[in-house]
Image (cartoon, rainbow, N blue to C red):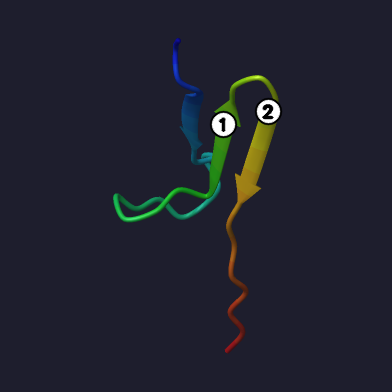
Amino acid sequence: MIGPKVEYINPANTITSKAFSQMVSVTGPHKTIYIGGAECSR
């Protein structure tokens, strides 16, 4: 049995870091997309 396919997505216009990804897509029997985000106001 092959495990799920995990894809880390960082769109060009977002902050990039080795510590996190903006989105993660997990594809197995179904596809789930996790979207991270934080809003900062100064």
**Is disc 1 placed on a helix, strand or loop?**
strand
Measured as percent of width and height from the top left, residue 41 is found at 61, 84
Up/down of 39 relative to 3, above or below: below
Task: Report, in whole angstroms, how far the alpha carbon at label 2 lies from the one at label 1.
Answer: 6 Å
Q: Residue at x 40, y 50 (%)?
A: 16
Q: Residue furthest top?
A: 1
Q: Decide if residue 32 is on the left or right side of residue 24.
A: right
| Disc 2: which residue | 31
Which quarter of the rendered picture does the N terminus lie within? top left
**Is disc 2 placed on a helix, strand or loop?**
strand
Up/down of 1 relative to 24, above or below: above
Measured as percent of width and height from the top left, residue 36 is found at 58, 57
Residue 25 picture quarter: top right
Query: Do the CB atoms of the residues marked 2 and 1 lie less than 8 Å apart?
Result: yes
Up/down of 5 relative to 34, above or below: above
Which quarter of the rendered picture does the C terminus lie within? bottom right
Q: Which mark is residue 34?
A: none
Q: Residue furthest left?
A: 18
Measured as percent of width and height from the top left, residue 7 is found at 48, 29
**Number of residues whose C-alpha sits closer than 10 Å to that of mark 1, classed few (under 14), some (14–19) or many (20 or more):** some
Q: Which mark is residue 26?
A: 1
Identify the mark nearer the N-term, 2 or 1.
Answer: 1
Query: Camera-side residue: 13 or 34?
Result: 34
Measured as percent of width and height from the top left, residue 2 is found at 44, 12
